[in-house]
Image: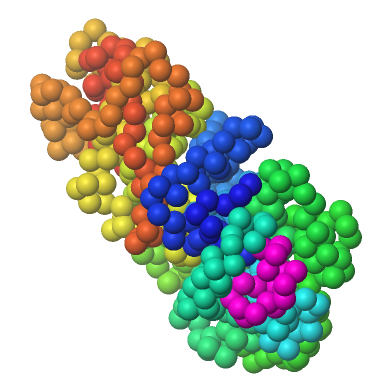
C-alpha cells in the first residue's frame, strides 16, 4: 500500500499514528479510506471489536455465572492490576489477560497472580516494561543510532540503496525524503522514542499499587533496583499485528521480524505477542531491594523480587485493606485489617483463606457495616439484570455502563477505578443510574430483554409492594417509600438518550455506538446510547425502574 501524502513510517511502524496526525485533512480522509478498503478486502474486523466482545463476555459471565464470588474477584483483581485498553497495542493482549491471567488466579495464590500479571503482555505493554533494557546490554541490532540503514532521522546522508528503498516503498522523491528526515530530526518526541534504557514505570506501580502500597517506606532507589531486576522481561514481536497486516496487504515476508527473532535466540515459530525473557537485555549486576541482596541472575532476579514483595508485611496489610474496603466498608478498622493481613501472611498469600478471614469476622456481620457499601456502576448493572431476571448479550449495555462512569478497561491511570462512595455518589451519577434503571425495566436497551410479569398486580399499590419485596427484599425506608409514592403520580423520567427504530438490530445499534476517548482524563466516555422505544406494562416498568433507582438498591 502506497502511503498518502508522502508520510514516512519507520520500519517497525512505531510512528504511524504520529505521521497520520501530520497529514492534511484531505490526505487524512484519503488515508482512512484506503485503510477501510483494506479492512473490507481482507475481511478484517475493527479493533474496537476486541474490547467490545471482551466487555460483553465480562458482563455476561458476571450475570449468568454460578460462581459469583469468583466473578466478584475477577472484577476486583482486574481493577487492582489495571490495564488501559486504549494504549496502542494493549487491547490486542486483553482477551489473554482476562482468560489466562486474571480468571485462573482470581481465587488462587497471590504470588501466582502477581507473577502472571508481571509476565502478561498486556501489563508489559501498558507499563512499558517490554522495552526496558539495561544500558549496558549487548544486544544484536540494538546500536540503532550508529546504523544509517535503521532510522530516517539519524543521518540525511544515508547510503544510496537505503534511500532508494525508502523512496520506492513510500512513493517519495529525493526532496520529500530529505524533508521528512529533517522533520524527524527536529522532533523531540521522536528523539526520545529512539532512546532505550531502563524503564521504571512497572517497578514503581508494582510496589505502589500491586503490593506494598505508597506508604510502605520503599525508596526511589528501590524503584530503580526493581526496574533493573525486570529488564529483559519483554514480548515477542510486540507490534506484530501491524506487521502482519502490512504483510497481508503487501504480500511480502517481514524479513526484519524474522531476523530479530533469530537474533533474540527464539525459535522460528515463536508466537507474536507472547512473553519471553531476553537475556541480552537484562542487567546482570547485583541488586538490592528493600535491604535484600538479589543476585540470582537472569530471569530469576525478577522472580526473586516478586518473592520479596509478596512476603513483605506491607503487602499483606495493603491487600487486606483493599479487600476489606471491597467487602466490608469504605473505612475498615485497623483491627480488621490486621486480622485479615495475618490470614494472608499465614497462608502465604492464599486468596481463599484471606477471604474466609473477612467473611467470618465479627466486623463483617456488624450492624454498622450492613449494606454500608455503595455499588460501583458495574455492580449496579449486573445486580439489576440478575434481580429482574433479564437476558442480555452484553453488547449495547456497555454504553450504559460507560455513561455511569465505568467503561471496562478504560481507566487510563494504573490505579484502576475507585471503590468508595465519595467517588460514585453525586447528582449526575445518580441520575445516570436512574436512567439505566428505567431503560432496563422498559426494555429500551438493545440486546437486553426483561419480562416483568412476576411484578404485576391488581393495582399500583400491589405492584409497588411486590416489586419492593423482590428487588429490595422488602427493606425500604419510610422516606424512600413516600418518595416512590409521589413519583408514581408523576410522569416517568425520560432518559435523555438517542432512540432507534424498534426494528433495528442489536448488532447495528452496537456498531453505531462508538467509543470516544477522553484525552485529558482517566476515564473514557461513549457517545449517546441508542435506545429502543419502551415496551411492556407501563405501570409495572415504571415501578420497577424507580425501585432500581432507589438509594437502597445502590447499596451492596
- Residue extending farthest to the front is 174
**Residue positioned 19% across, 15% down in the render:** 460
The x and y percentages for residue 498 are 28, 29
The x and y percentages for residue 296 are 81, 84
Can see residue 206?
no
Q: Relative to 444, say whether 74 is above or below.
A: below
**Residue positioned 66% across, 34% down in the render:** 42
Q: Is residue 136 magenta?
A: no
Q: Relative to 43, say whether 323 is above or below.
A: below
Q: Does the magenta stretch include residue 160?
A: yes
**Residue positioned 50% across, 54% down in the render:** 5
Q: Which quarter of the picture shows residue 175?
A: bottom right
Can see residue 507?
yes
**Residue positioned 61% across, 38% down in the render:** 38
The x and y percentages for residue 441 are 33, 23
Range drawn in magenta:
148-166
Amino acid at each position: 500500500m502506497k502511503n498518502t501524502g508522502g508520510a514516512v513510517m519507520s520500519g517497525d511502524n512505531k510512528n504511524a499514528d504520529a505521521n497520520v496526525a501530520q497529514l492534511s485533512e484531505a490526505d487524512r480522509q484519503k488515508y482512512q479510506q484506503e485503510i477501510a478498503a483494506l479492512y473490507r478486502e481482507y475481511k478484517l474486523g475493527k479493533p474496537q471489536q476486541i474490547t467490545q466482545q471482551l466487555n460483553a463476555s465480562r458482563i455476561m459471565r458476571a450475570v449468568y455465572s454460578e460462581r459469583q464470588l469468583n466473578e466478584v474477584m475477577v472484577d476486583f483483581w482486574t481493577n487492582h492490576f489495571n490495564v488501559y485498553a486504549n494504549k496502542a497495542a494493549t487491547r490486542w493482549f486483553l482477551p489473554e489477560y482476562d482468560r489466562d491471567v486474571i480468571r485462573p488466579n482470581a481465587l488462587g495464590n497471590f504470588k501466582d497472580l502477581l507473577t502472571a500479571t508481571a509476565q502478561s503482555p498486556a501489563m508489559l505493554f501498558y507499563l512499558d516494561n517490554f522495552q526496558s533494557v539495561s544500558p549496558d546490554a549487548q544486544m544484536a541490532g540494538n546500536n540503532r543510532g550508529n546504523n544509517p540503514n535503521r532510522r530516517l532521522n539519524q543521518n540525511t546522508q544515508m547510503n544510496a540503496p537505503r534511500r532508494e528503498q525508502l523512496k520506492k516503498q513510500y512513493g517519495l522523491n529525493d526532496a520529500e525524503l530529505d524533508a521528512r528526515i529533517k522533520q524527524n530530526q527536529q522532533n523531540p518526541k521522536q528523539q526520545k522514542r529512539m532512546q532505550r534504557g531502563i524503564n521504571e514505570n512497572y517497578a514503581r506501580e508494582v510496589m505502589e499499587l500491586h503490593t506494598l502500597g505508597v506508604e510502605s517506606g520503599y525508596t526511589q532507589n528501590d524503584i530503580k533496583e526493581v526496574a533493573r531486576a525486570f529488564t529483559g522481561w519483554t514480548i515477542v514481536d510486540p507490534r506484530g499485528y501491524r506487521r502482519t497486516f502490512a504483510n497481508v496487504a503487501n504480500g511480502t515476508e517481514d524479513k526484519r521480524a524474522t531476523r530479530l527473532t533469530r537474533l533474540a535466540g527464539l525459535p522460528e515459530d515463536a508466537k507474536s505477542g507472547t512473553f519471553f525473557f531476553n537475556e541480552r537485555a537484562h542487567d546482570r549486576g547485583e541488586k538490592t531491594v528493600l535491604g535484600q541482596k538479589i543476585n540470582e541472575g537472569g530471569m530469576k532476579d525478577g522472580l526473586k523480587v516478586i518473592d520479596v514483595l509478596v512476603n513483605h508485611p506491607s503487602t499483606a496489610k495493603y491487600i487486606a485493606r483493599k479487600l476489606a474496603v471491597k467487602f466490608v466498608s469504605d473505612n475498615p478498622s485497623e483491627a480488621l485489617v490486621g486480622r485479615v493481613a495475618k490470614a494472608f501472611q499465614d497462608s502465604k498469600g492464599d486468596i481463599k483463606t484471606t477471604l474466609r478471614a473477612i467473611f467470618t469476622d465479627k466486623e463483617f456481620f456488624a450492624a454498622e457495616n450492613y449494606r454500608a457499601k455503595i455499588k460501583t456502576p458495574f455492580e449496579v448493572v449486573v445486580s439489576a439484570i440478575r434481580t429482574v431476571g433479564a437476558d442480555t448479550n452484553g453488547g449495547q449495555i456497555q454504553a450504559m455502563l460507560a455513561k455511569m462512569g465505568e467503561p471496562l478497561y478504560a481507566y487510563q491511570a494504573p490505579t484502576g477505578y475507585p471503590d468508595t462512595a465519595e467517588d460514585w455518589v453525586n447528582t449526575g451519577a445518580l441520575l445516570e443510574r436512574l436512567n439505566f434503571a428505567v431503560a432496563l425495566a422498559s426494555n429500551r436497551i438493545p440486546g437486553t430483554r426483561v419480562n416483568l410479569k412476576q411484578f404485576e398486580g391488581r393495582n399500583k399499590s400491589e405492584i409497588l409492594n411486590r416489586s419492593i419485596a423482590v428487588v429490595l427484599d422488602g427493606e425500604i425506608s419510610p422516606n424512600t417509600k413516600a418518595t416512590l409514592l409521589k413519583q408514581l403520580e408523576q410522569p416517568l423520567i425520560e432518559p435523555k438518550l438517542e432512540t432507534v427504530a424498534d426494528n433495528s438490530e442489536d448488532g447495528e445499534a452496537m456498531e453505531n455506538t462508538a467509543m470516544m476517548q477522553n484525552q485529558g482524563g482517566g476515564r473514557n466516555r461513549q457517545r449517546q446510547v441508542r435506545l429502543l422505544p419502551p415496551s411492556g406494562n407501563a405501570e409495572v416498568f415504571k415501578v420497577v425502574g424507580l425501585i432500581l433507582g432507589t438509594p437502597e438498591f445502590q447499596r451492596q
